[in-house]
């Protein structure tokens, strides 16, 4: 069957508004979810993109590409699966005085580690120098954050994400120890549960995220939820050990 021709792709000038996310290329197109090309990676543009359910994703040698996938992979915080093995890991982490979770202590270091982590599904990395500079600027503006796993005062795992209002958008994670990135994600979930943030956007569908409770939802439903969250006052990005206890007692699904 011949694939229908792709619709025209908006070419953005720096500072130009985004087209609506629901105008992204459809499933039958060469790049499902592609919204626009061009524009800039400055703080106002990134803030506008995420607030509209759009995110940048491109590799070296490509122009800036903007996406809004349909369906959208989302982790509802209340459905996080704290598997028995991960529960044991977290409990060990809680009891060990050498271990701690920090937020926004080493954002640039976390991004660098994520950029250097090999990915099974792609060669190289999409976290190139321009992306790192852009998200470090967004971090300086208070809207990109890191969740860090420290052992013996050494950063061993972590993730970074975007936070707009009460909406959280997961970006990438790394680890140098067994289950380190899962502990970082569990810490983010614990923080979200404490502050009653309902979901974490995961953007892309992966088996790993699905095993932890993430699931695809229609983009329209995601955009509806997002609209109610981005304009709210964000909670403080600070982790307290009591959040672990709340997570352990929350009745998260186990297997």
Image (spheres, rainbow, N blue to C red):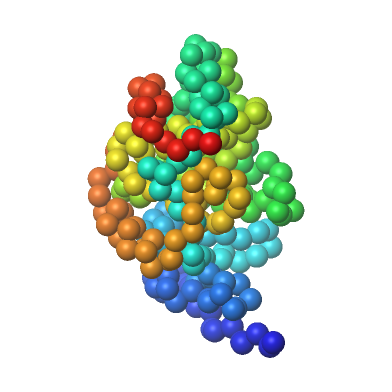
Percent across and percent down for residue 196 are 29, 40
Percent across and percent down for residue 18 are 41, 70
Residue at 54% of width from left, 29% of height from top?
A: 84
Question: Can residue 210 be seen?
Answer: yes
Percent across and percent down for residue 99 are 52, 18
Residue at 30% of width from left, 60% of height from top?
A: 227
Query: Which of the image's four quarters has the N terminus?
Result: bottom right
| Residue placed most toward the observer, 243 or 160 | 243
| Position of residue 62 in the picture relative to residue 99 (left or right) | right
| Residue placed most toward the observer, 254 or 117 | 254
Residue at 65% of width from left, 59% of height from top?
A: 59
Residue at 49% of width from left, 67% of height from top?
A: 70
Q: Quadrant of residue 197?
A: top left
From this viewpoint, which residue is outermost toward the front?
A: 255
Q: Is residue 25 above or below residue 145?
A: below
| Residue placed most toward the observer, 159 or 143 | 159
| Residue placed most toward the observer, 95 or 119 | 95
Percent across and percent down for residue 250 are 36, 32
Q: Is residue 135 above or below residue 187?
A: below
Question: Can residue 146 be seen?
Answer: no
Q: How many marks?
A: 0
From this viewpoint, which residue is outermost toward the right?
A: 123
């Amino acid at each position: 069957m011949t694939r229908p021709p792709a619709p025209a792709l908006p070419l953005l000038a720096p500072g130009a508004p985004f087209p609506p996310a629901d105008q992204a290329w459809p499933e039958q197109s060469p790049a499902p979810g592609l919204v626009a090309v061009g524009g800039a990676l400055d703080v106002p543009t990134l803030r506008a993109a995420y607030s509209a359910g759009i995110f940048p994703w491109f590799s070296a040698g490509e122009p800036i590409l903007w996406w809004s996938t349909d369906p959208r992979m989302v982790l509802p915080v209340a459905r996080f699966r704290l598997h028995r093995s991960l529960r044991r890991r977290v409990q060990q982490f809680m009891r060990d005085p050498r271990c701690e979770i920090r937020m926004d202590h080493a954002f640039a270091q976390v991004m660098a580690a994520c950029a250097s982590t090999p990915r099974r599904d792609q060669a190289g990395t999409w976290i190139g120098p321009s992306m790192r500079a852009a998200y470090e600027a967004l971090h300086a503006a208070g809207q990109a954050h890191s969740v860090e796993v420290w052992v013996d005062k050494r950063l061993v795992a972590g993730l970074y994400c975007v936070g707009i209002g009460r909406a959280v958008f997961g970006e990438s994670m790394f680890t140098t120890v067994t289950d380190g990135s899962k502990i970082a994600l569990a810490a983010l979930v614990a923080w979200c549960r404490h502050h009653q943030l309902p979901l974490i956007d995961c953007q892309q569908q992966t088996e790993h995220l699905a095993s932890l409770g993430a699931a695809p939802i229609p983009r329209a439903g995601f955009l509806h939820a997002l609209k109610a969250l981005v304009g709210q006052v964000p909670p403080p990005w600070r982790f307290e050990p009591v959040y672990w206890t709340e997570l352990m007692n929350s009745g998260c699904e186990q297997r």
